[in-house]
Image: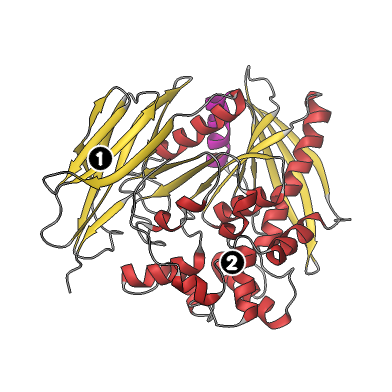
Amino acid sequence: MAHQIQRRSWSFLMACGLVALPSTGARADLLEYVQKPEPHFAWKLKQKIETPAGVVYDIEMTSQTWEGIDWTHQLQVYQPKDIAPNAVMLLYNTGGKADGKNIVFGMGLAKQVGAPCAILYGIPNQPLFGGKKEDALIAETFVRFLDKKDADWPLLFPMAKSVVKAMDALQAFSKEEWKAPVKSFVVSGASKRGWTTWLTAAADPRVKAIAPMVIDTLNMVEQMEHQKETLGAYSEQIRDYTERGLVPIPPTEEAKHLWRMIDPYFYRDHLKMPKLLLLGANDPYWSTDALNLYWDGLPGDKWVTYVPNAAHNLEQDGDRSRAVNALAAFTRAQITDQALPHLEWKHDDDAAGRMRLTVTTKPEPTGARLWAATAPTRDFRKAKWVERPATICKDTVTGLVDAPTDGCIAFFGDLDYEIDGIKYHLCTQMRVAGKAKH
């Protein structure tokens, strides 16, 4: 996917000594933890639930013992009626335990992709250490790593290992139940579970493809500098890290090593599998154009789907179908070995000084448009995204946007496709232009 986006200087990374390709030390820490034997690993089929939509297999799993704590999980497999097992399985990781909404989501997704799907719950096991959950818990383990210098402490490691052990359990389960073992996986998850998705893919070759959601912060050192510059301050959503003195990143070797260990960007030479990034255009966690700080560095086939007027939950007016359909289409392509559209794009200006986006695509999309938002500054998190026209001429899509006379504007291309009856969207990178009001 070619493009022309103005890039920021790498001087900050160089100054921090973090510009190199993935640190062998950081990768060794992750692999060593994931590959460490787990005597307490176990799984059992607890219940087989027949429903009008299909069968739910409810599996109980212990993934590991971490810092003296056994991590237990609920792992459910959803097999719709008249859907046969497949050698490729979607494995979605999330927190908590299964409820009615999760089961409807899992069964519906499996029906869309035409193969059984699995959801792994309890990522991470929580609360821990005095009731801490989610980012507060992750931040606590980062602080403990800096204090104890023990590479097992960062919580993302046991989170990723839980997904790896779920793959072990699913392969054994599928061989036992269906006599047809699963061979590879499409892994997905949202937010810190999207973070987990990236690290799982870096650690296990069974991951055929990934679809991380709303974790728009790879290349984290530069992201933090860019976030403060574009938003005026660090996002309130990452206060668990700022309050613990983890952001800005302390100027110590231990802190630099920590961020190498848990930043997927430093594992990118092991992330060559197909990737679909699912992002909210109004996500309050990240800078609007955060993708531009790491897109170029990601190897292999890659696509992005933005959800306009959606925050961290990827909902548009309470509807998540745009994100779910993109995930289903991506998974369907991996299961059936179908090629997804090839897109290349270029942001430049025309002779009249208008900002121009040109996208070449094979095959031709069934529809296309631009989405644009305006704001007084480069903070578009509360901005309203509005459709603007784009022209399709065979395999080329073109859109024009007037440069702002006041404030700032952001825009991206949005193209429509279909695979095996699933309609979905693929997008381009964003371009941000204009001068912030002071």
- Relative side of 219 to 61, left or right: left
- Relative side of 215 to 123, left or right: left
Task: Name the residue carrying label 1.
Answer: 370
Sequence-wise, the earlier of marks 2 and 1 is: 2
Q: Residues within 10 Å of mark 2 (few under 14, many from 20)?
A: some
Q: Where is residue 224 in the image (x, y as percent from the top left)?
A: 44, 70
Q: How many labels sit on residues?
A: 2
Task: Name the residue carrying label 2.
Answer: 133
Residue at the location (40% across, 67% down)?
9
Q: Position of residue 255 (x, y in %)?
A: 61, 77
Main secondary structure type of the part rendered in magenta: helix
Q: Is residue 60 above or below residue 81?
A: below
- Relative side of 268 to 329, left or right: right
Magenta-span inclusion, residue 382: no
Q: In this view, does 336 lie above or below 345?
A: above
Q: What residue type is labelled 2?
A: Lys
